[in-house]
Amino acid sequence: MAYCSIAIDGPSGAGKSSMAKAIAAKYSFIYVDTGAIYRTVGLAAHRRGISCSDEAAVSKILPELNIEMKYDGQGEQRMYLDGEDVSSDIRLPEISICASDVSALPAVRAFLLEMQRSMARTNNVIMDGRDIGTVVLPDADVKIFLTASSAERARRRLLQLMEKGINEDYEKVLREIEYRDQQDSNRDIAPLKPADDAVIVDTSELDIDGTIAVLSSIIEERLDLN
Ligand code: DC
């Protein structure tokens, strides 16, 4: 049986995960948050006191890491590191930076590629990340590149953190977003960029329902769901 795949790429804070979750629920697809996998590697390096941009040191720990992705009863993706549920810890701001740092390392990207592809071989997936349409699933049925201004993305990220009880300063969140944009877009391997056949959607002026409506019409047209 052939499975359908939807790739959503874009910079941090563009609304990829909220959109992918909503779309997954609407069309009964499995949502795969690939950033969470990079975050788990970043957390593992951080916990070992290793510099997240030290390729030799990070490569050395990869074979000993037991990273698992599981879905709970509500269909929420949970990340496990050596048997421990680290789904909250990987969201800490310092781990965002570690995730971006380790994600620039070719050894890390190669290590995580198969884990991501195997999900799409056995499920209808909507997968979000930076290189899903370009590298992980180049044959995805639908490719969307979701973006928004950095100021708007920082505002949204701040709200998200507040909902989780984490209080942060706007300027700090904006700087972190701009650091990650710069690094994720300019790395040599699998940089953040739209696939040639991706539809680019700017959400700066759209609310959640408006964005869902735009994405739904793209998906329904591409998957011939009408
Ligand atoms: O989506 P996120 O903010 O949780 O991702 C964390 C970091 O992981 C991000 O700065 C870049 C990296 N990443 C990546 O390089 N490729 C992906 N497919 C997903 C995330």
Image (cartoon, rainbow, N blue to C red):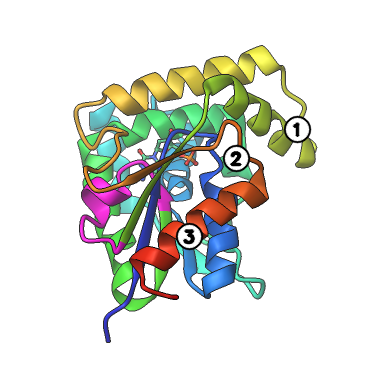
Q: Amino acid at mark 2?
A: Arg
Q: Foreground: 189 or 106?
A: 189
Residue drawn at x 41%, y 38% as measured from the top left: 10
For mark 2, give the secondary structure: helix
Left or right: 163 as drawn, with respect to 92: right
At which x and y percent is residue 33?
47, 54
Of the pair 37 and 22, the residue shown nearer to us: 22
Q: Is residue 189 above or below residue 76?
A: above
* Distance from Cα at disc 1 to Cα at disc 2: 10 Å
Whether residue 218 is situated above or below residue 12 in the rendered picture: below
Q: Residues within 10 Å of mark 2 (few under 14, many from 20)?
A: some
Q: Who is closer to the viewer here, 5 or 179?
A: 5
The residue beneath circle 2 is 91
The stretch of residues the image draws in magenta is: 128-141
Snapshot quadrant of residue 3: bottom left
Disc 1, SS: loop
Judging by the rendered image, the residue that carries numbered circle 1 is 166
Mark before the other along the chain sequence, 3 or 2: 2
| Residue visible at 35% across and 22% down in the picture | 183
Q: Would you place residue 142 above or below residue 163 in this image?
A: below
Write down the quadrant of residue 121 in the picture: bottom left
Residue located beneath label 3 in the image: 217
Q: Where 107 falls versus 101 (above or below)?
A: below
